[in-house]
């Protein structure tokens, strides 16, 4: 859709704003907001500033893992209309005008409103890409994730102010249009969740029931496995695979005489292994015999929140090793295939088999001794190969659909951001695109 432009523009005098409508004004931020610090409101609702959602109750999201302090007395009160800024993430968009009353972290900046402008318009303006670029320029520090916004410079930022009726029109237009985009994003997110569930269901069924719907079944003797095909063997991991933890990192032994590249936990993701810019560590002759990876080895993460995450080494480097936080599984005979057991690990990990007491928040360590004792169902080698081929094809199709949905979300969010910036900085004229009652 093509939007109209204003009839005349003027130079804003600010590089990152460029030209703005000729009749718009601007004021420095300090004339509209005054920094405040209201404390001793520990019983109020806990709020947080989200890059994608603005200021909302922390309890409304299940993806915020930042731990709150036991003592909330120093948390700051926020009322509707206050400007709230996560000073370390302002450049990422963690800035918003609040529509809620509650308390936020002592590390945030809270600004009390001194103005009579439209708060929804200011909310969109202060979060648009032009302003986040300005926050980036005003943030200083040693590391980018620890940059702080400089309040004395931030207070001088020019705030674009169209006439009041126009602010209302812009806010109403953006409320309407962003709601449409957000609904489309939510649809794509639901699709992604359904595809993940479908992937898990397809893999789970294939590695526990096989591909023949008419096969006779038997009790596996393992509660979370249930019934498995009668001709499959139920056995502990250690009976079918050699399990070897990697080498402990010891920086004092990095002499340079036997330096070799090695993999870390975060180099091993589901189904893929990073080999770019790997660190090096000494591996002497005995270590090289014990820890060198071979084509087809299955690598399994043994600790933290990534227990069970696996990938197959396909010989990406001529010589490579791995650290102690990884298990290397190697089939003892040709009766077992690493690819089949990779899918078994995907099934078991997502089922929560390796999580202590079913508590997803628990940080676990899958010791080699414990891992060897876990029992799984193993079909004959030919059936393992058929199941692996079937799952490769099925998962590839599901991955393709999920990647399309992820790309769709990215494009929708880019369009949303561009539309907001265009409207609040006057690059498009939306006054005729909303009903009078919508803009009131």
Image (spheres, grey):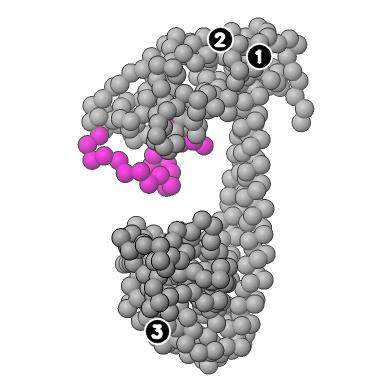
Q: Earlier in the sequence, mark 2 or mark 1?
A: 1
Q: Residue at x 36, y 17 (%)?
A: 35
Residue bearing mark 3 = 238
Q: Which of the 4 image quadrants contains residue 56?
A: top left
Q: Residue furthest front?
A: 257
Left or right: where 330 falls relative to 435: left
Residue lying at 77% horizontally and 27% vertically, measured from the top left: 2
Contact? badges 2 and 1 (CB < 8 Å)? yes
Label 2, label 1: how many angstroms apart (C-alpha)? 10 Å
Q: Earlier in the sequence, mark 3 or mark 1?
A: 1
Q: Callout 2: few (<14), some (14-19), or many (20+) C-alpha neighbours within 10 Å? A: few
Q: How far across and down, in percent of the image, does residue 386 sit?
A: 63, 82
Point 42% across, 47% down: residue: 62
Helix, strand or loop at label 3? It is: helix
Distance (Cα) linking label 3 and label 1: 70 Å
How packed mark 3 is, by other alpha carbons closer than 10 Å (few <14, some 14-19, many 20 or more), is some
Query: According to the image, label 1 marks what residue?
Result: 20
- For image coordinates 46% across by 13% down, the residue present is 156
Identify the disc placed on residue 168.
none
Q: Quadrant of the N terminus?
A: top right
Mark number, residue 26? 2
Residues drawn in magenta: 49-72
Asked if residue 25 can be seen in this view, the reply is yes
12 over 409 or under it: above or below: above
- Crowd around label 1: few <14 · some 14–19 · many ≥20 (10 Å): many
In the displayed structure, 303 sits above or below 179; it is: below
- Give yes or no for residue 65 being in the magenta stretch: yes
Image spot of residue 329 (x, y percent): 45, 77
Residue 401: image location, x then y, percent: 66, 58
Foreground: 154 or 292?
Answer: 292
Left/right placement of residue 10 relative to residue 239 reads: right
């Amino acid at each position: 859709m093509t939007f109209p432009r204003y009839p005349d523009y003027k130079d804003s005098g600010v590089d990152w704003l460029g030209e703005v409508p000729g009749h718009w004004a601007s004021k420095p931020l300090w004339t509209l907001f005054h920094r405040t610090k209201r404390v001793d409101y520990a019983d109020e609702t806990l709020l947080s500033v989200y890059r994608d959602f603005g200021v909302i109750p922390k309890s409304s999201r299940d993806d915020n893992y930042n731990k709150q302090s036991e003592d909330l007395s120093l948390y700051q009160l926020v009322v509707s209309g206050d400007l709230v800024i996560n000073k370390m993430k302002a450049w990422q968009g963690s800035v918003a005008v609040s529509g809620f009353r509650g308390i936020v972290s002592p590390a945030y900046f809270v600004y009390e409103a001194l103005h009579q402008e439209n708060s929804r318009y200011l909310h969109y303006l202060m979060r648009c890409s032009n302003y986040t670029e300005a926050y980036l320029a005003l943030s200083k520090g040693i590391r980018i994730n620890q940059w702080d916004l400089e309040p004395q410079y931030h207070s001088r930022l020019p705030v674009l102010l169209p006439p009041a009726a126009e602010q209302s029109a812009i806010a109403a237009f953006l409320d309407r249009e962003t709601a449409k985009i957000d609904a489309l994003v939510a649809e794509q997110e639901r699709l992604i969740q359904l595809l993940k569930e479908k992937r898990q269901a397809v893999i789970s069924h294939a590695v526990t029931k096989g591909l023949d719907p008419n096969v006779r079944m038997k009790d596996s003797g393992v509660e979370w496995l249930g019934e498995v095909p009668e001709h499959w063997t139920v056995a502990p991991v250690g009976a079918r695979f050699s399990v070897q933890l990697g080498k402990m990192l010891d920086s004092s032994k990095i002499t340079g005489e036997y330096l070799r590249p090695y993999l870390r936990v975060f180099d091993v993701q589901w189904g893929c292994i990073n080999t770019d810019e790997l660190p090096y560590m000494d591996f002497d002759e005995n270590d090289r015999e014990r820890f060198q990876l071979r084509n087809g080895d299955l690598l399994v993460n043994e600790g933290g929140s990534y227990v069970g995450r696996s990938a197959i080494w396909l010989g990406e480097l001529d010589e490579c090793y791995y650290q102690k936080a990884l298990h290397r599984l190697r089939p003892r005979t040709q009766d077992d295939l690493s690819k089949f057991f990779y899918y078994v690990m995907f099934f078991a990990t997502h089922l929560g088999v390796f999580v202590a007491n079913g508590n997803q928040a628990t940080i676990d360590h899958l010791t080699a001794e414990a891992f060897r004792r876990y029992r799984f169902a193993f079909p004959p080698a030919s059936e393992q190969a058929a199941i692996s081929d079937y799952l490769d094809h099925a998962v590839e199709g599901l991955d393709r659909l999920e990647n399309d949905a992820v790309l769709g979300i990215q494009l929708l969010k880019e369009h949303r951001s561009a539309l907001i910036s265009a409207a609040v900085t006057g690059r498009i004229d939306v006054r005729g695109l909303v009903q009078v009652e919508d803009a009131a």
